[in-house]
Amino acid sequence: MNFENILIEHNNSLATVIINRPKKLNALNRATIKDLSKAFKALAKDKKTRAIILTGNGEKAFVAGADISEFANYSVKEGKDLAAKGQQALFNLIENLSTPVIAAVNGFALGGGLELAMACHFRIASNNAKMGLPEVSLGVIPGYGGTQRLPQLIGKGRAMELIMSAGMIDAEKALSYGLVNYVVPQEELLPLCLKIAGKITNNSPVAISYAIKAVNAGFKNNAKGFETEINAFGSCFGTADFREGTTAFLEKRKAEFPGT
Ligand code: COA
């Protein structure tokens, strides 16, 4: 299979998917989402692959968000489509994959990057990792499931604060919040993921796929939450705040939000 922006390494029954746009801090553009969707669909069908690790190339970022340069001029409809199609093609796909997916968070996991890590079955971080949902600093909201999965993982109050403040937390705080399961030095991140994945692959793949389904079923009463997120995300694309927020990011200056 040919991919533009990802690499896949196979090691016996484990596959490591590496997002490979380090110069753009692995920001998720359309092509990368397409590559990831194709790769996860293929890996899910591959009976030899019993666990998948998802990480970013380079030492700085897992994924620094959705690619802001790509959506800055989108209309309300295009914004809504971006969230709806992205959720379906990638984020929901990973969450419901019958093969276990571990996010190896090797640096910044911001916006769509944290949403991607949260769609994985669990997360392990390197000690330089920083996580957050900075969307409201751009005049938009998380659109790839972040308003739903963050409160599931860390509780409503902490999620509200993180989303509204557009702040970033470090790996230790993410560990204390239960957002990640372990924090290790960067050079130990993939070895630890491989070790845990190795334990998983000793177990019954059929039973594991049922366990994923059962755990996820407990959170499936929030379909309206995801739908509300998609509609609200789309609405942001019609605001002056969104135009100012994205323009300011691309012009590398602080945004002055008009509040309309
Ligand atoms: N979309 C598009 N490009 C991005 C990006 C994103 N989400 N995040 C980083 N990049 C690009 C930068 O524009 C820059 O490109 P350039 O070299 O062509 O100018 C390159 O990646 C390196 O990023 P830079 O900002 O120079 O690195 P930094 O170390 O100074 O800052 C961050 C790192 C993560 C704090 C900063 O890149 C950032 O705030 N990114 C956006 C995070 C965000 O808001 N994500 C949510 C999107 S909805």
Image: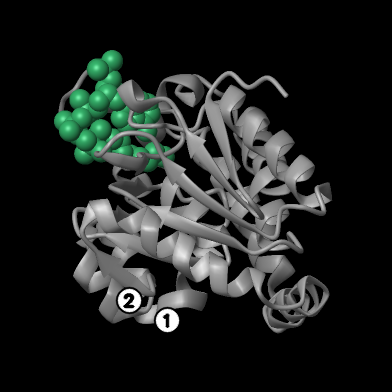
Q: In the depicted view, which residue is nearer to us: 144 or 230?
A: 144
Amino acid beneath label 2: Arg
Figure disc tally = 2
Q: Position of residue 25 (x, y in %)?
A: 33, 31
Vertical arrangement, residue 260 with respect to residue 104, above or below: above
Crowding around mark 1 (Cα neighbors within 10 Å: few <14, some 14 to 19, many 20+) is few
Viewer-nearest residue: 23 or 192: 192
Residue 127, compared with residue 251, is above or below; it is: below
| Residue named by callout 1 | 155
At 71% across and 61% down in the image, what residue appears?
Answer: 99
Quarter of the picture containing the C terminus is: top left
Is residue 86 toward the left or the right of residue 67 in the image? right
Residue at the (57%, 50%) spot, across then down: 144
**In the image, is 150 to the left or to the right of 137?**
right
Residue type beneath disc 1: Gly
Is any part of residue 163 visible from this angle? yes
Q: Can residue 258 be spotted in the picture?
A: no
